[in-house]
Amino acid sequence: MVDTMREIERKYEASGTTKDGGLPDLTGVDAVADMMDRGVVTLDATYYDTPGRRLAADGITLRRRTGGGDEGWHLKLPVGEDTRDEIRAPLSDTLPGTLAALVRSRVRATELIPLVRLLSERDVKHLVDADGALLAEISADRVTARRLAPETGEPVRWTEYEVELAEGGDPALLDALEPRLTAAGLRRSAAPSKLARALAETDPARSAKGPARKKSAKKSAEKSAKKKPAKKAAGDTAGDVVLGYVRRQITAIVALDPAVRLDTPDSVHRMRVATRRLRSVFRSYRKVLDRAVTDPIGAELKWLAAELGVDRDREVLTARLAERLAEVPVELRLGPVAARLRIWSEARRQGSRGRLLEVLDGERHLALLDRLDALLADPPLRPAAARPAGEVILDAVLRDYGRLAERVEAALHAPAGHERDLTLHEARKAAKRARYAAEAARPALGKPANRFRKLMTGVQELLGDHQDGVVAREALRELGVQSHAAGESAFTYGLLYGREEALAAARERELPELWAEVSRPAHRAALRR
């Protein structure tokens, strides 16, 4: 069993002007009415990572800590500036399986080893309002850090200050407190975490520098933390542009794995979109990336998207049916329609949720992640990848647009009914591919690519709503059959079915006008400028 908490905190360190004791009196700042002393606790934490520090590379920390009121295993996942999600599991000798699963997309088959041990003497104070309610906890940590892998022998020591908001606290309080803290000589910590600073200051490479290491370690850590990677000029080559987009999607797939396991809202959808974007860009930019390598990976991405889609499609369909049902007057809701819809949805969710977790833990998924890593390490670039991006990227975008145009024209001339539904569905997939091709083209083609992406998105959304209606009608027919077999009235399902038919017809009427606007030559000409 695990508990998840949203941690919002800022870390500070002493400067040359820090006053004795470090922490100033913070009463009177914002809603802070009192600063209550909570004593000193001793914390003993061992941090784990792979030998190659895969977790640290993504700003993730995994530790086993004793002491304090929350001893146990803690996994911290970055969310944004000053914000992390902390997942806690009870204290045990070995890593709990729930936390091991949450780092699996990074760790995979690699062994986790104890990397650093931190001993902290924490002097804790509570900031409370006039009613005694906790606003934030502020602490001064006297830290002793020792590298365990490889062992470096000599520990390093420093004092760090943390301000952590109480659960549900207002982040604006951190901004209000900062001037008082900096006036007392504190400054934002150069390292994002204690682990990062410990790794920097116990780096074996620095040991070889001799006695000067101690003096320079902190400055080196600060310099390293502040240094930003140099930005490559956008659009240098077609390979630069395409690989940049590919890298972002692979990063998203790996990073969203724990969120999907935790059932974080919208995480399944976002991970599925990343797989689709990646597969789509492989196909769109086949002159840049060798299909002999990307096609087999694309097949695996298609499989993963389908597995993710089981749960996501259920969510979308359930929300659509619930919305349509809410529009029906109460007097026309005959029988336990809402209850049957809820039971039907939950039954599908239980099976799909369990299946999805099995997929994420399976060898096939982990092998796919390894192949994606290998692709980035040794990109299968074709000769066109070395050419200036503009021409190559433009050709790919226009080629995907041409494919979409053919399918839309076919749909506009297809007879009403099942055949038109199928052709509109194919056009929707082509619109999505053209959208992602334009999305990837932004660094090379600039704002015109973004405007073109928006046009493709409009077509995709209209056709997507039409397809959702097709799927909804199938589900309503299934629910109607179930209710009839149970001796209930199927009237309301038939009513909803008819409304979905009317909505689909409306979308079909809207398509010619939308397509006339989207297909104007001026939109494609803008991409060439």
Image (cartoon, helix red, strand yellow):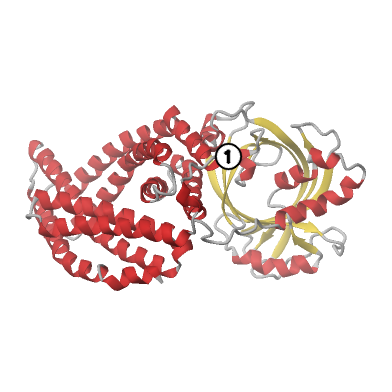
In percent of the image, x 51 and y 42: which residue is there? 379
- In the rendered image, residue 58, in percent from the top left (x then y), is placed at 60, 45
Outermost top residue: 93
Above-or-below relation of 188 to 285 = below
Above-or-below relation of 73 to 459 = above
Q: Quadrant of residue 208?
A: top right
- Residue behind mark 1: 88
In percent of the image, x 20 and y 49: which residue is there? 338
Above-or-below relation of 422 to 129 = above
- In the rendered image, residue 168, in percent from the top left (x then y), is placed at 54, 57
In percent of the image, x 29 and y 64: which residue is there? 458
Q: Foreground: 93 or 154?
A: 154
In percent of the image, x 33 and y 60: which residue is there? 398
At label 1, the amino acid type is Arg
Left or right side of 265 for 25: right
For the C terminus, the quadrant is bottom left
